[in-house]
Each structure stands twice: as C-alpha cells, then as structure tokens.
Amino acid sequence: MAEHLALLVADVFEAAGALRRAGEALAAEEGQTQARWQLMSVVSEAPLSVARAARRLGVARQGVQRIANELVRDGLAEFRGNPDHRTSPLLALTAAGQRALRAITARAASANQAMSEGISEYDLAAVRALLQRLTRQTDDWTEAASPARSARPHAGTASTREEDA
C-alpha cells in the first residue's frame, strides 16, 4: 500500500506541474501570472488581509504581499481600511481587476472543458473525493507527528495578531 501511495504522490506532483503550466499559459494570455490570478481569485468574493489571503492560498505572506503590491500598482486591486485591524489593510479588486479575473476565468472554463474530454463526471468526482480524503489524512498525520506544529493554534482558536488580520 505504501508503494502505491508513493506512486500516487509522484503522479499528483506531475499533474500539479502540468496544471501549473496550463494556468501560467491561461493567465499570460491576459497579461497576468498564475500567482496574480490566484490572488485575484481569492480576494474576488470579499476583501481579505494579505495574511489571510496567504493562509487561504497556503503560501508565505511575504510573497503574497509582493504580488498584492504589484496588483495595486497596476490598478487591478486596492488596499482598503480594515475595521478589525488598523495596520493590516484589506485587499480588494478594482473594476479593472474584476474584468481581468473574468477574462482569465472564461479562458479557464474553456480549457477545463477541453482537458476533461473523455473523463466522466463520476471519475472526476471520485478522484476529487479521494484527494480531499488524502489531504485530510495527511494533515492529520502531520499534526500528530510534529509536536511543535500541534502546539500552534488551529484555525478558529486563539492566535497572534498578524494571523488574525
């Protein structure tokens, strides 16, 4: 069983690389990068602080801050006051950012249709369910295996001021 999981992990990394390359190509057609697309997407429903956006994306806050600054510089996003945290503004899309995101999303929908040709909805749903279960079990294993990590606050519990922003 462990050997099968190791092979699955290799396949997932290979698929992630292929999907990342496709995402870069889709975003580039609108003059963006995949990282910028992901950040625009994560703040599209509601403005978020950079720290919260970074947690949602599972990446370092510093990298998200750099991309947020670029989006603001390019007029695709803006920083707004945060009523919950004076020193941690909220990142929100501008009308230009919303148009860019819609254009990339439309291209992605077309690409997803082409990439899923010949794959049944049932198979896609089964793979998603398996990956979600594997992700949960991996996170649970990581929590249990790392004493330093398990001592950190979890989402929804007390945390540092930066994490709350």
Image (tube, rainbow, N blue to C red):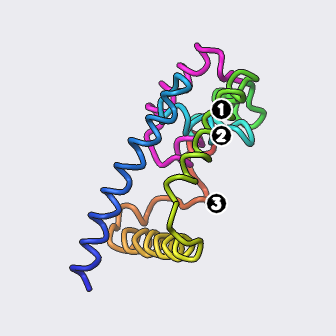
Tag 2: residue type?
Ala
Q: Is 164 situated above or below 98?
A: below
In space, the residues marked 2 and 3 are separated at their CA atoms by 34 Å
Name the residue beneath numbered marker 1: 103
Q: Secondary structure at mark 3?
A: loop
Query: Given contact means CB atoms under 8 Å apart, are the residues at marks 1 and 2 in contact?
Result: yes
Decide if residue 124 is in sight here: yes
The residue sitting at the left extreme is 3
Which percent across, then down, holds residue 47?
72, 36
| Residue 121: quarter of image | bottom right
Q: Secondary structure at mark 2?
A: helix
Specify start and end residues of the magenta stretch as a single range: 52-79
Tag 1: residue type?
Ala
Name the residue beneath numbered marker 3: 156
Q: Residues within 10 Å of mark 1 (few under 14, many from 20)?
A: some
The residue sitting at the bottom extreme is 1
In space, the residues marked 1 and 3 are separated at their CA atoms by 35 Å
The residue at the point 66 percent across, 30 percent down is 91
Q: Secondary structure at mark 1?
A: helix
Tag 3: residue type?
Gly
